[in-house]
Image (cartoon, rainbow, N blue to C red):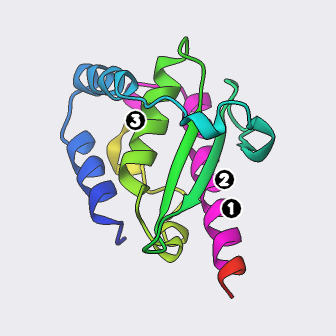
Amino acid sequence: MKLPPKLQEIVDDFAAMTREEKLETLIAYAETFPPLPEHLKDARSKMEPVPECMTLVFLFGERQPDGGILFHMDIPPQSPTVRGLATILANGLNGCQPEEILSVPADFFLPMNLHEAVSQQRLNGFAGVLMHMKNVARKMLEQKL
């Protein structure tokens, strides 16, 4: 399985961690969760909802001048685990070309052994966020044609 380099690095890091380290790292990722840019703060209607998550998650992708995608997400601060998982995806996929995002397998995170640290419900939401990131990438590819 070939992943974008930044995402592969994150997968490798988590695969080598203990359960406690995974939890600490998820919280650290949550603490770096970026706020929405000003132009999206009142534009939730432009954002794609992720109903697979129990927590309210909305995402928006912006095409960069080089064709890569920059993802923005809106997740409540009282959901640090979800914010941490979303930050993993954003850090691993921001800047990638749509084709790279679409090539990420739905189960790319299995080697990370996240099931040691978070519930299956959270992992389903994590996979849902990836699926919606892929939807954004697919739409951008279609607009390019």
Residue 80 picture location, percent across and down = 47, 18
Residue at numbered disc 2: 132
**Label placed on residue 35:** none
Give the vertical position of 5 relative to 46 (above or below).
Answer: below
Residue 94 picture location, percent across and down = 42, 55
Residue 38 is drawn in which quadrant? Answer: top right
Q: Secondary structure at mark 2?
A: helix
Residue 3 is drawn in which quadrant? Answer: bottom left
Q: Secondary structure at mark 3?
A: helix
The kind of residue tagged 1 is: Asn
Horizontal side, residue 12 vs residue 35: left or right = left
**Label placed on residue 135:** 1
**Label placed on residue 114:** 3
Horizontal side, residue 113 vs residue 104: left or right = left
Give the residues drawn in magenta, as a range: 114-141
Q: Residues within 10 Å of mark 1 (few under 14, many from 20)?
A: some
Residue 121 picture location, percent across and down = 62, 29
Q: Nearer the viewer, residue 15 or 34?
A: 34
The kind of residue tagged 2 is: His
**Label 3, label 2: how many angstroms apart (C-alpha)?**
20 Å
Rendered residue at 64%/43% (across/down)? 59
Q: Residues within 10 Å of mark 2 (few under 14, many from 20)?
A: many
Horizontal side, residue 11 vs residue 97: left or right = left
Q: CB of mark 2 within 8 Å of CB of mark 1? A: yes
